[in-house]
Image: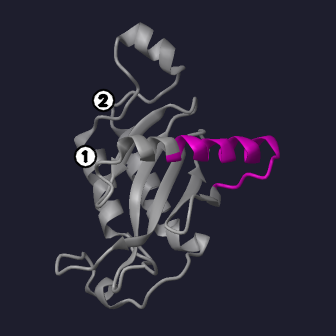
Amino acid sequence: MALGSTPAIACIGIIGQHDNPLHISLFPPHEDEELDMSFLLNSSLDIFDIRLRNKTVDQDLGLLHAVDERLATYGWLTNTGIKFIIAIDMMGRPPTETTPNPQARNLPPVLGLRDSELKPAFKAIQSAYIALLMNPFYTPEVRTPMQVMHATGKSAEITSKKFINEIQRIGKTWYPGITSI
């Protein structure tokens, strides 16, 4: 782990009921790793499927898998089958003067994360998603991606600027130990 760095969110994925990506946000220093992060999110969906088949699913799935000593994914399942996946970079990014919370600049090094440390981020993502669903101009995914493409000519991908900005804010604000976002 780099001296003075703290774990940070590398990627947030919102995945539809049919395992199609609805939204993917990447965070520094992973902005240019869209293909790698898509692969990471896709491989995390296998863990969702295994747990669903074994009926061992709670809303908070916790750690889905650790890719290596640097990256790990955590999952959250909504009542409607939408999946939220957060990829954490344990090396994170070094704190800067623009780190949202001054306390985050002075945190001791983190050697691991408890599942509960991501609950504030997942709850904030869920709140943002609920606000998106309440928008009368947003049509949620109710059919398979192919049916949506065939009927409307467009994908089910989320394009709401307000939602995307909120996901970006959540990803940049979160740090281990934060209690509310």
Q: Amino acid at mark 1?
A: Lys
Precedes in sequence: disc 1 or disc 2: 2
Q: What residue sits right under mark 1 in the picture? A: 162
Q: Where residue 134 appears, x then y in whole percent?
A: 38, 40
**Residue count near mark 1 (Cα–Cα under 10 Å), binned few <14, some 14–19, many ≥20:** few
Q: Position of residue 83 (x, y in %)?
A: 55, 44
Residue visible at 33% across and 83% down in the picture? 104
Depth check: give the residue in front, 112 or 17: 112
Q: Magenta stretch?
A: 40-59
Distance Cα–Cα, label 1 vs label 2? 13 Å
Left or right of 164: which side holds 148? right
On-image quarter of the N terminus: bottom left
In the rendered structure, the answer to whether residue 164 lies left or right of residue 83 reads left
Q: Amino acid at mark 2?
A: Phe
Q: Is residue 132 left or right of residue 67?
A: left
Q: Secondary structure at mark 1?
A: helix
User: In the drawing, what numbered circle is on residue 42?
Assistant: none
Rendered image: mark on residue 137: 2
Confirm whether the magenta stretch covers residue 57.
yes
Q: Is residue 45 magenta?
A: yes
Nearer-the-camera pick, 146 or 38: 38
Please tell me which residue is depicted at 29% across the width and 46% down the height of the picture: 164
Say which residue appears at 47% left-offset and 68% top-offset: 120
Residue 2 in the image, given as x and y percentages of width and height: 37, 80
Asked whether disc 1 touches disc 2, contact meaning CB atoms under 8 Å apart, the reply is no
Whether 4 is drawn above or below 59: the answer is below
Secondary structure beneath label 2? loop
The answer to which image quadrant residue 93 occupies is bottom left
Q: Main secondary structure of the magenta part?
A: helix
Mark 1 vs mark 2: give the one in front. Answer: 1
Which quadrant would residue 92 be assigned to in this image?
bottom left
